[in-house]
Image: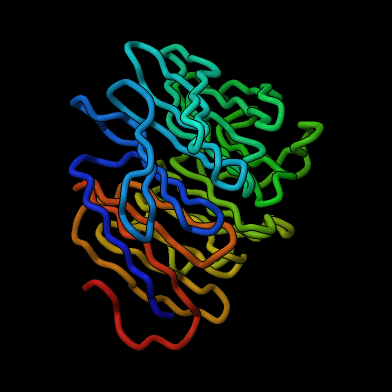
Amino acid sequence: MNATGTTTLHLGTEPTAIDLTGDGRLVAVSLLSLDARSPTEVFDVTSGQSIRALGTGLVGRGVAFADEGRTLYHLFERDTQFVFARSELAGGRTEELASYAPGQFCRELRRDSTGRLIAVCGDMVEVWDTANGTRVFSAPPFRKGLPIQAAFDAAGTTLWLWGTVDGNAIIGLDATTWTERVRIPAPAAAGTQLAISPSGARLVAVATATMGVFVYDTPRQARIVPDRYGDTTYSGRFAFSQDDNHLVNLIGGAVLIDRLEPRELLELHGLGDEAAALAVADYRPVVAASWKNGTIVSFEWNDEPPRAKADR
C-alpha cells in the first residue's frame, strides 16, 4: 500500500472532530476554539484554503457532511448548551436545529454515507432524518453517565448502538422501524468508539474498561483477529475505508492501514503527536487524520506492494 496526494493543514488549534466529503474533496473540522475563531471550519483538501467558518462558541464537537457535500451539519458548545446546526456551504445560510442541556453532554455526530441519517451522540443518542429535518429516534443511556456509542452502515439501513438499552450488548437496529435486528455480546458496559464497515459485516468496538479493541464478524457475531488488537491500541481511532477489509487506525502519532485478509500492516504517516480525530471518504480511498497540535493530514492510499513510507 502506498500514500499519494498528501495534503497537510496546520490549524494552530486542536481539532476535536473531522469529516470528509464522499469524494475526499472537502474536509470539515470541529475546533477547540478558545479565541475569536469559529468552532467549525471547512477546507478545500487540494489547496488547503478555508471555504467557510461556521458557528459561534468555544468548542466544536462534531461535523457531518450531507447532500453530496453541499450541506454541513455541525455540533458546538455555546454558553451552557450544545447546539446542533445545519449550514448550506454555497448559500451561506445557517439554521440552528436543536439545543441540548449540559447534562446530555453531546460528544460527536455520526452519519451514514450520504448524510441522510445523522446521530447526535453523548449521554443519549438522537437520530435526525436530514431529508425532512425531523428527529426520528432517540434513546437514553443504559446507565446514567455512560456515553452511548453509535455507528451507521454505509447504506443507512442499520444503526449500531453500544451503551443503551442493554449494557451487555452491542445492538443493531433497523433504521426504518427502529426495532432490534441483531445483538452482539459487548466487551464492557460502555466504550469510546464503534466503527462499522460499509456493508455492516465487520464492527470495531473500543473498550476502555478492558483496554481492548474488539473486531467482530457481525453475521457470525464472533470476534476476529484477536492477535493484533489489545491494550496497546485501545485509545486509538478507527474507521473502515472503502470495504470490509481495510481498517484505518489512528494511534498515537501514526496512521496505520490494516488489510485484514490477507494480513498486511503499513504505517503511512507518523507525526509524533497525540491523535485527535479520523475520517475516511465514502467513494475514494482517502483518509484524513488530525493531531492535537493542530495538524491535519489527508492522503489517498492504494493496495499495491509498499515502496516507501510517506511523511516520516
> What count of labels does the image hold?
0
Residue 167: where, in percent of width, then height? 58, 32
Residue 205: where, in percent of width, then height? 52, 49
Residue occupying the point 65% across, 52% down: 154
Residue occupying the point 49% across, 14% down: 99
Colour logic? rainbow
Residue farthest toward the right in the current orientation of the protein: 177
117 vs 240: above or below: above
Q: Pick whichever, 52 or 230, lies toward us.
A: 52
Name the image quarter holding the N terminus. bottom left
**Left or right: residue 193 compared with residue 218:** left
Residue 278: where, in percent of width, then height? 40, 52
Residue 269 sits in quarter: bottom left
Residue 14: where, in percent of width, then height? 24, 40
* Camera sees residue 185: no
Residue 298 sits in quarter: bottom left
Residue occupying the point 60% across, 35% down: 118
Q: Pick whichever, 157 or 148, lies toward us.
A: 157
Q: Pick whichever, 172 or 227, lies toward us.
A: 172
Residue occupying the point 70% across, 44% down: 156
Q: Pick whichever, 58 or 139, lies toward us.
A: 58
160 vs 255: above or below: above
Name the image quarter holding the C terminus. bottom left
* Camera sees residue 106: yes
299 vs 86: above or below: below
